[in-house]
Amino acid sequence: MSDKAILEYEGSRYEFPVIKGTEDELAIDIKTLRATTGMVTIDPGYKNTGSCESAITFLDGEKGILRYRGYSIEELAEKADFLEVAYLLIFGELPNKEQLAKFHHDIKEESHVDEEMKKILDGFPKAAHPMGVLSSLTSALIAFNPSSVDVSSESAMYSSIVRILAKFPVLVAWTMRKKKGLPLDYGDDTLGYVENIHKMMFKRPNQEYKKDPIAIEALDKLLILHADHEQNCSTSTVRIVGSSHAGLFASLSAGISALWGPLHGGANQAVLEMLEAIEADGGDTKKYMAKAKDKDDPFRLMGFGHRVYKNFDPRAKIIKKSADDVLGNLGIEDPILEIAKGLEKEALEDQYFVDRKLYPNVDFYSGIIYRALGIPTEMFTVMFALGRLPGWIAQWREMRLRKEPIGRPRQIYIGENLRDFVPLEKR
């Protein structure tokens, strides 16, 4: 096979290198396209455009494969905890016992959030969407940590990474507690990373915190499954903002805003809103499955199929068991969750959905778990952001260490040609 791609246009012939990734992905390197031909490519949504070379996450949507740094998502979800996966994504290798202990210790040392941040939180109305609050609080961290990261210093980079991994869960917990009218909590340094998140979110002011192993394990798995997903909308946003040499916290804040959209991180919230709408209409799942199959019906079945995974979502297979465990062990009686189980059963058995590979995806199951754990629907995307944090950090760090150029897409102009200015009195 030739290692060149040939472009012929109006009698001219141009050659461009073909590069191959470690998983045999092929790409045409068009860095010199405009300089040599005067042309650019157009690819709305960048579905056919590689914006970078990355060693972090491999995803094959056709085969249902997801790997972090070469490790399968199935094995990581079964054998690792979220903090190990965070370390792996950011630094490239799984930590040994000493590295993991130091990583956790250093995070705990940085977990205090300046008291003045509470004044910023107080400025938001209780009705404010938690994603807007979280994005603002993350950006506000810059005011309390004003120096930019010296990316040439390993220790400075490490300190910034540890700092945000420590403070971000506090901001997440505060965002939820503000929504629920609960006093703010700093957690407990004697607990594990995910245990502490659970405590900060759920401890009641008049009750002793009781560890819930099933809930914590489900939360840990969900965070692992959401930790990175290649060059999606929010990750690309983090990288492109960071390419201007904006700091880590500013880049993360931009990523949170990108994740907020219903076509991205808001999908699990959309699942629950759909289930609530079905319940309000009588809870007839068969009626809504029929509506989903009707091409003329505007109803969309949320949480089924995936724009990247054309066969199955490997994360959904993993989290389905956790959803079953949570619902079974907590003994929750909730009509919304019953509707969810009904839709799942019908989709897995209905030939229409089976033929089209419209299986429940990770958003479907994560929404169910979060509701069962008592997390408000508006907080679902915030939980997604909490899981995605190490992936965003890893992508930002990789982009800066590789000294990638500032992102600057081109366009095809389709506006007016040059025209004369018309004075106001003649318009």
Image (tube, rainbow, N blue to C red):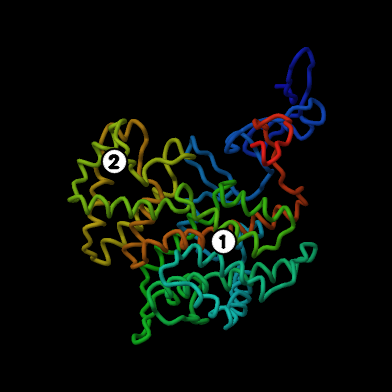
Rendered view: 201 above or below 360 = below
Which quadrant does the N terminus fall into? top right
Looking at the picture, which amino acid does disc 2 mark?
Leu
Which mark sits nearer the N-terminus, 1 or 2?
A: 2
- The image shows residue 238 at horizontal and vertical percentages of 63, 54
Foreground disc of the pair 1, 2: 1
Which residue lies at the image location 36% right of the left edge and 81% below the top edge?
204
Observer-nearest of 233 and 159: 233
Observer-nearest of 178 and 123: 123
Residue 108 seen in the current view: yes
Looking at the picture, which amino acid does disc 1 mark?
Leu
Q: Quadrant of residue 379?
A: bottom left
Which residue lies at the image location 21% right of the left edge and 45% below the top edge?
285
- Element under disc 1: helix
- The image shows residue 5 at horizontal and vertical percentages of 72, 23
Residue 98 seen in the current view: no
User: Which residue is farthest front?
Assistant: 425
Which residue lies at the image location 47% right of the left edge and 71% below the top edge?
175
- The image shows residue 387 at horizontal and vertical percentages of 51, 60
Rendered view: 127 above or below 59 = below
Residue named by callout 1: 389
Observer-nearest of 253 and 26: 253
Number of residues whose C-alpha sits closer than 10 Å to that of mark 1, classed few (under 14), some (14–19) or many (20 or more): many
Residue named by callout 2: 348
